[in-house]
Amino acid sequence: MIELVEFWKNCDLSQPPYVHDDDRSSIDAATNISKITLRSHRAFVEHPTFGDENDGSLHLGLLPVSYQGNLLRADIFIIMLNPGLGLSDYQTEEDAEHAEQVRLIIRQNFAEVEVSFSVPKS
C-alpha cells in the first residue's frame, strides 16, 4: 500500500495531461485507444465524442481517481474498476478548491484536507 501512495506522490498533478511518468510510454504506445486532454466542461460537451456511449477514450485532462480516503487508516479496501466518466466530472474539476482537495487525497496529505470535503455543502 505504501508503494501505491509513493507511486502517486511521484506523479505531476500540476497540469494536464495527468499521466504518471511510469505509465507514459505505455499510454503513448497504445494505438487502439484515443487520448483526450480537455480543460473544461464546455470543451467536453463540444467534443465530437460527447454522448458516444461506445467511446473509450482516456480523458487525461481529469485528475486520476486512484483511491479515496486515508489508506493508512482503512480497515478494509474495496477494489473497483475505473470509476468511468460522468457528465459532471469536468465541471467539478473546474472548481479549483475541489481539484486541490483531490490532489491532496491522491498524495494522502490529510493535514490540509478539509474535513467537510466529502460532506455536501447545504
Image: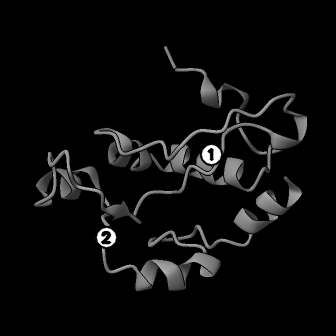
For the residue pair 89 and 7, the one nearer the viewer reads as 7
Name the image quarter holding residue 43. Answer: bottom left
Residue sitting at x 87%, y 57%: 2
Residue type, numbered disc 1: Gln
Relative placement, left or right, of 62 versus 67 is left
Q: Is residue 96 left or right of residue 101?
A: left
Foreground residue, 1 or 96?
A: 1
Horizontal side, residue 39 vs residue 108: left or right: left
Q: Nearer the viewer, residue 22 or 29?
A: 29
Residue at which label 2 appears:
33
- Say whether residue 3 is left or right of residue 63: right
Which class describes the residues within 10 Å of circle 1: few (<14), some (14-19), or many (20+)? some
Residue 71, x across and y down, in percent: 81, 41
Specify the farthest residue to the top.
122
Q: Residues within 10 Å of mark 2 (few under 14, many from 20)?
A: few
Which secondary structure, mark 2? loop
Residue type pointed to by label 2: Ile
Does residue 84 sit above or below 28 in this rendering?
Answer: above
Counting residues from the start of the chain, the first of labels 2 and 1 encountered is 2
Rendered view: 114 above or below 81: above
Check disc 1 and report its element: helix, strand or loop: helix
**Circle 1 is placed at which residue position?**
101
The picture places residue 11, in percent across and down from the top left corner, at 65, 71
Compared with 68, 64 (above or below) is below
